[in-house]
Image (spheres, rainbow, N blue to C red):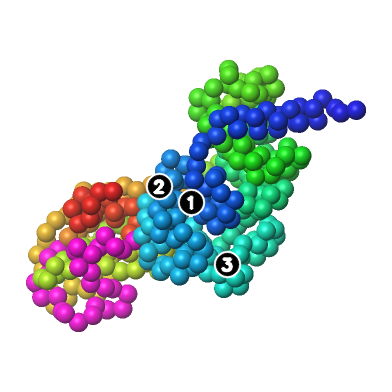
Amino acid sequence: MKTEKVIFVEDLSKKLIIWYQQNKRELPWRKSSDPYKIWLSEVILQQTRVNQGLNYYLKFENRFPDIYSLAEGSEDEVYKLWQGLGYYNRAQNLLHAARIIVKEYGGRFPEEKEELLKIKGIGSYTASAVASMAFGKPTPVVDGNVFRVLSRVFGLYTPIDTAKGKKEFSSLAGKLMAGHPPGIFNQALMEFGALWCKPKNPDCTHCIFFKRCYARKKNAVLALPVKKPKPKVTDRYFYYLVTETQNGKILMNKRGSNDIWKNLYDFPLFTLQEKSEPLQTLDQPPFQSILPGLVYALSDISREYIHLLTHQRIHAVFIRIFVENFPEQSPEKGLLLIEKNKIEKYPVPRLLEQYLQDQKLIKHH
C-alpha cells in the first residue's frame, strides 16, 4: 500500500508535467533533441535569465550551427559573441569542450552523464541536462529554480550551496522524476521555478501545490531556499591608461589568466586597494614602462565607473592621453596597437564596453 508521502510525490510530478505542457515557453532549443543545441543553450543559461540568454543563443547558433563549426572558431570570436554575458570561463569551457568532442569523439556527444563528465569544460549540471534532454537518461538537473521549488514545497533548509545540499536536492529530484520522461520532467521543474515559483512575489494563491506547499503553510516562502552567508565584497580601484597615437590607434592588451576577465582585452592598467588621485598613477611602474620618451597631452579623465562582480566591486577611472610620437614598431610584449574603428571586433569586459560606448569608440548594442 502506498504511503501518503509516495502518493504526494507521484501527484506532484504529474501535476508539474501537466502544468508544463500547458504553460511552457516556446524556445528554439526545445524544438530539437540535438545534443549540440541543448548543450549550447544550457551553457549560456547558467547564471543567465532566458530573456537575456535567448539572443546570445541565436547569435551562437547562427554563427556556429554545429559542433564542428564551433570547434574551428577562434577564441577571440567566441569571446566577442559572449561579450556582456559575464562569467567568461563559460565561453572558454564551451570552446574547449567543442574541440574535445570533435577531436576525441568524432563530433558525437556521449550519451551517459559519466562519459560527458570526462570532457574538460562540461560540469555536472550541463552533463545532466544533455544526458536527460537529448538522450532520455534519468539524470536530475538541479539549478536555482529547482532548488527554490523543492525547498519551498518540501521545507528543506539545507544550504543549497553546500555539497550536502546539492546531494539532498538531487536525490529528491531523482525520486520525483521516476516514471516520467527525464528531459520533460527536468524542464518542467526548472520552468515552474522560472515562471511561477519566483524568488519574489510568487503567486502562491493559484499555485498547483497550494494545499501541500510547506513554505506557504509556514509563511516561509521568502526564507527558502537557504544559502551560506555571503563572503565580504572586496573593493578594487582600477586606473586605465587609454593611449591614443598620432595615427589614430589605441594601445590595448590581452589579459592573462591570473585575474578576472581572462583572455579579454583592456587597456594598460594600474590596480590599487584604495582610491588614488588618477594623475598620480602615471608615475607607477605599469605606466612608466610605456610613457618615458613620449610627448603626450592629457585628453580626458573619465568619471568613476562602478562594476559589480560576485565578490568584487570594481571602481574604474580611464585616463585618456594623446601621444604625438608613439613609435611605429610593435609595442612591448603583451601590448598591441588597434585602430579605433576596429576595437569593436575585440572582446572586452562589460565595464570597458560601457566606457567605449560613452566615448563613442564603439556603438551601443
**Which label is found at residue 44?**
1
Residue 364 visible? The answer is yes
Above or below, 177 against 129 in this view is above
* Pointers 3 and 2 in contact (C-beta within 8 Å): no
Q: Residues within 10 Å of mark 3 (few under 14, many from 20)?
A: some
Tag 1 secondary structure: helix
Q: Position of residue 72 (x, y in %)?
A: 45, 70
Residue for point 14% across, 67% down:
248
Question: Which region shows up in magenta?
Answer: 321-347
Going by the numbered disc 3, the residue's amino acid type is Gly
Q: Please give the name of the residue rendered at 15% of the width and 79% of the height, measured from the top-left corner.
A: 327
Question: Disc 3 or disc 2, which is closer to the eye?
Answer: 3
Q: Nearer the viewer, mark 2 or mark 1?
A: 2
Q: Which mark is residue 55?
A: 2
Percent from the top left, x then y, of residue 96? 51, 67
Q: Nearer the viewer, residue 143 or 243?
A: 143
Q: Residue at x 16, y 66 (%)?
A: 244
Mark 3 lies on a secondary structure that is loop
Q: Name which residue lies at 59% across and 26% down.
A: 221
